[in-house]
Amino acid sequence: MLADAEFVVNLGSMLANGRVMFPEAVHLIAVDPAGMSGDLEFFDRRFPGVAGRIDDFVVALRSGAMYTFTVFLDQYWSPETKESPPKWTAGKYRLSARFDGRGASKVALDMPGIALMNFWLGTVASPAIEFVVTGR
């Protein structure tokens, strides 16, 4: 995402004072060989539950800056089919990413000023990539 303005984005949640990050605001949209579309949500199986503090995963972006991170398909699940990771049958797929920009949602008592930051709000999607899953 490139922009002419400076802003911050909320990519999701953080645990352990930023040692663990969950980019939940980034969804994957998969289109299967039959043309059916499904939303995939981030899910880190190492942390099925949380007991403790949760903070927003905030990234500041200067004008023209870009932030990238690597994800793996086994870190996503399908809320529709309840599969984690999703099961891919043989065929040609399309995959794109969607970012749902929102403000601070986990405002802790010791960090109330985070809600005042210049958050980018809205939705933006990437172009789709195509890939083929072969039979096993």
Image (cartoon, rainbow, N blue to C red):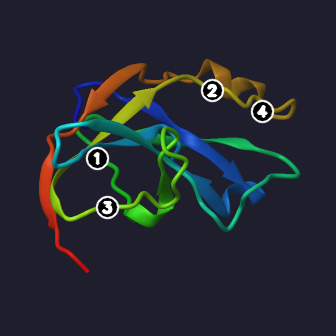
Q: Is residue 96 left or right of residue 123?
A: left
SS state under label 1: loop
Give yes or no for contact between labels 1 and 3 (Cβ–Cβ under 8 Å). no
Which callout, 2 or 4, points at the residue further toward the start of the chain?
A: 2
Residue with the mark numbered 1: 66
Of residues 3 and 98, the one nearer the viewer is: 98
Q: Is residue 119 left or right of residue 3?
A: right
SS state under label 4: loop
Residue with the mark numbered 3: 88
Residue with the mark numbered 4: 111
Residue with the mark numbered 2: 104
Give the alpha-carbon distance from disc 1 to disc 4, as whole Å. 26 Å
Give the residue type that dot 2 points to: Ala
Which of the 4 image quarters holds residue 38?
A: top left
Give the alpha-carbon distance from disc 2 to disc 1, as whole Å. 20 Å
Give the residue type that dot 4 points to: Met
